[in-house]
Image (cartoon, helix red, strand yellow):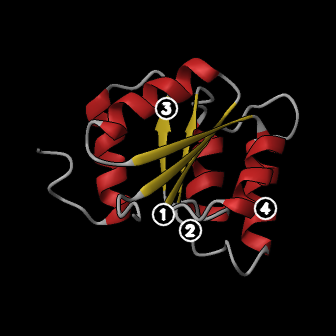
């Protein structure tokens, strides 16, 4: 039996944050895979085919911008939408993310469930997600 739920890959160095995002998104019917750190995230991208990536920027092994750069350089991965989820809230990072790197959206930690769901709904084009 195949799993037809939309798949989200969370690349984050804090397992607790992965579990929080998993809890929020699974309640809305998503399948969520977590990858702890940039290296594990790059490995997961080779085997998983997510519909969306939630990507932390500040990770100790490989930072999120490097994960993003490598992903966008791969023709098999370049069209997967990316939402940056980070505690780094300085405006320059938001400008870099949304305008230069062309990430699809940006969510600053700490965030509430509705903020995350609204961002996912915006990126995936599912307006029912944020209100249901």
Image location of residue 54, percent across then percent down: 54, 46
Q: Which percent across, then down, holds residue 62?
A: 86, 40
Using the numbered discs, state the Cα–Cα distance from disc 2 to disc 3 in whole angstroms.
20 Å
Residue 72 placed where, x, y %?
72, 70
| Neighbourhood count class around disc 2 (C-alpha, 10 Å): few under 14, some 14–19, many 20 upward | some
- The CA span between labels 3 and 4 is 20 Å
Label 2, label 4: how many angstroms apart (C-alpha)? 13 Å
Residue depth check, mark 1 versus mark 3: number of the one nearer the observer: 1
User: Of callouts 3 and 4, which one flags the residue occurring earlier in the amino acid sequence?
Assistant: 4
**Residue identified by numbered label 3:** 108
The image's mark for residue 51 is 1
Compare residues 83 and 101 and report the one nearer the observer: 83
Q: Secondary structure at mark 3?
A: strand
Mark 4 residue element = helix
Residue appearing at x 27%, y 36% in the figure: 27
At mark 1, the secondary structure is loop
Which image quarter is the N terminus in? Answer: bottom left
- Mark 2 or mark 4: name the one nearer the start of the chain: 4
């Amino acid at each position: 039996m195949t799993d037809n739920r939309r798949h989200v890959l969370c690349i984050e160095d804090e397992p607790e944050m992965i579990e929080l995002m998993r809890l929020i998104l699974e309640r809305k019917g998503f399948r969520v895979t977590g990858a702890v750190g940039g290296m594990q995230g790059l490995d997961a991208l080779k085997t998983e085919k997510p519909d969306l990536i939630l990507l932390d920027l500040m990770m100790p092994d490989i930072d999120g911008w490097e994960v993003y750069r490598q992903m966008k350089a791969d023709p098999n991965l370049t069209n997967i939408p990316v939402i940056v989820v980070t505690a780094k809230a300085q405006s320059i990072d938001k400008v870099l993310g949304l305008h230069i790197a062309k990430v699809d959206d940006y969510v600053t930690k700490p965030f509430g469930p509705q903020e995350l769901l609204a961002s996912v709904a915006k990126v995936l084009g599912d307006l029912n997600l944020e209100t249901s």
